[in-house]
Image (cartoon, rainbow, N blue to C red):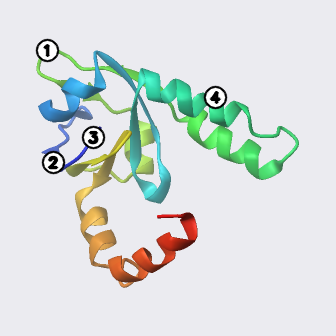
Amino acid sequence: MFIGEYQHSIDAKGRIIVPSKLRCDLGERFVLTKGLDNCLFIYTLEEWKNFEEKLKALPLTNINARKFVRFFFAGAVECEADKQGRILIPNNLREYAELLKETVFIGVSNRVEVWNKENWESYNDSEEFDANEIAEHMVELGI
């Protein structure tokens, strides 16, 4: 299970250190892809396979399902950290998530999210993010 919040910087070549606490649970190789809310998602290979199976089960005849599948697969790349614990984030993914210098890694249960630091702070400070209001809606989801 991934938890916690970690701040790191991207170097000029697009490399970033994956926090050691997260790297241990990710394993030697893992999948990085576009995520929702303009961040990146990182999945273990096992979790990616589970997610892949769910995506493959979506109906090919549904245009939104096709768009959703393309969104995740087109941006996906398998990563392996180097000896310093760094990965290279491809330019298209850096642009998508607006990763310029300062980033935040967020542990979110079965995945890790990588955010532009300013976007993460803005997300947390926005009027749209009211934890009490969100909690009220969780009842509808059975939580």
Residue 60 place in picture, x, y as percent: 83, 37
Marks 4 and 1: in contact by CB < 8 Å? no
Q: Secondary structure at mark 4?
A: helix
Q: Earlier in the sequence, mark 2 or mark 4?
A: 2
Give the class, few, some or many, for how many residues have Cα within 10 Å of label 4's Cα (few <14, many ≥20).
few
- Amino acid type, residue under disc 2 in the picture: Tyr
Residue 129 place in picture, x, y as percent: 37, 77
Quadrant where the N terminus lies?
Answer: top left
Alpha-carbon span between mark 3 and mark 4: 21 Å
State the residue position of label 4. 53
Residue at the image point whose x is 34% and y is 46% from the top: 113
Q: Which mark is residue 6?
A: 2
- 93 and 41: which one is in front? 41
Alpha-carbon span between mark 3 and mark 1: 22 Å
Residue at the image point whose x is 36% and y is 85% from the top: 127
State the residue position of label 3. 2
Q: Is residue 51 left or right of residue 21?
A: right
State the residue position of label 1. 83
